[in-house]
Image: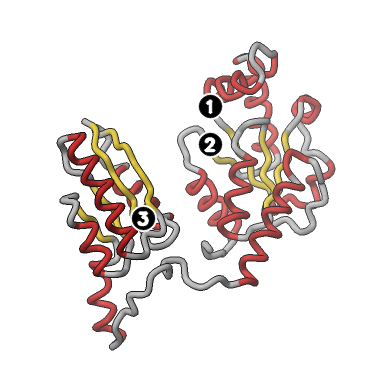
Amino acid sequence: MRRTVFFISDSTGITAETIGNSMLAQFEGVQFDTHRLPFIDNPAKAEAACLRIKTKYAQDGQRPIVVNTMTSRTLCDIVAGSGALMLDVFAPFIDPLEAELGAKQSGAVNRSHGLVDFERYEARIEATNYALAHDDGLDVDYNQADVVLVGVSRSGKTPTCLYMALHYGVCAANYPLTDDDLDKLELPTRLRPYRSRLFGLTIDPIRLAQIREQRRPGSRYATLKQCRWELEQADRLMRRENIPVLNTTHTSIEEISSKIFEYLGIERHMY
């Protein structure tokens, strides 16, 4: 079964897409063709979105699903004219909030992510620059690091660091364990002063070999034998040094980050 889904917003569409994908993930037997329509913030754009949804309805013979975070009732009604199943994310919460707060919603568009907090924005930019500068051991000055991820090459360290920086303003560095480190089975000297900030990532050897094969086809680096050896040695090292470890094979970046924050006691709000 295949169904078409539109994520529609008067802002970036990130909220609609995030919540929508979380809901869709509960239906394993259905394949979804998803489309994001951001900045639907006036009647003309809403009419265009409505026409696009109607056209898809006619092509598929099944009504599309719309996950909607538009706050304007007028714009919502225009899109609803498409005949799609409308899932209004904010609707169930507006009436109870109005009653509790004793105030009416403004209905203003482009407010889903609030006003820009320039101080927090700068923190995210600085954290992202830090993650890039301290990627794969390029810079090993970890004094400013909130966390230092440790693991073999291609175990998920870089994308996790960038996610934590971009969304939470966390200064995250990563250190790739080399063959030399793994032969010695000792924590590298440069990491020892930051032991309390270390967190290890591991991965299934078959999956690691697949990832490496895409990066360096036919190389020793990508062989299953090499991957298994590196992972086994890394596991021994991190158990010996009492470094917490998380397997990333079937874990999303969001979940990896949350578990790291929880373990290390890092409290940050998503921006």
The answer to whether the residue labelled 3 contacts the one labelled 1, judged by CB atoms less than 8 Å apart, is no
The picture quadrant where one finds residue 105 is bottom left
Q: Which residue is mark 1?
A: 204
Task: Decide: is 264 above or below 119.
Answer: above
Q: Which residue is mark 2?
A: 247
Where's residue 163, x and y in %?
58, 49
Which dot marks residue 53?
none
The local secondary structure at tag 2 comes to: strand
Which amino acid, mark 1?
Asp
Q: Which residue is mark 3?
A: 16
Residue at the far front: name it: 44
Where's residue 25, x and y in %?
32, 42
The picture quadrant where one finds residue 117 is bottom right
Q: At x 32% / y 64%, what residue is drawn?
A: 70
| Marks 2 and 1, how far apart at CA | 8 Å
Q: Earlier in the sequence, mark 2 or mark 1?
A: 1
| Marks 3 and 1, how far apart at CA | 32 Å
Q: At x 23% / y 42%, what residue is drawn?
A: 55
Viewer-side residue, 132 vs 263: 132
Which amino acid, mark 2?
Asn
Which amino acid, mark 3?
Ala
Where's residue 229, x and y in %?
66, 20
Viewer-side residue, 200 vs 167: 167
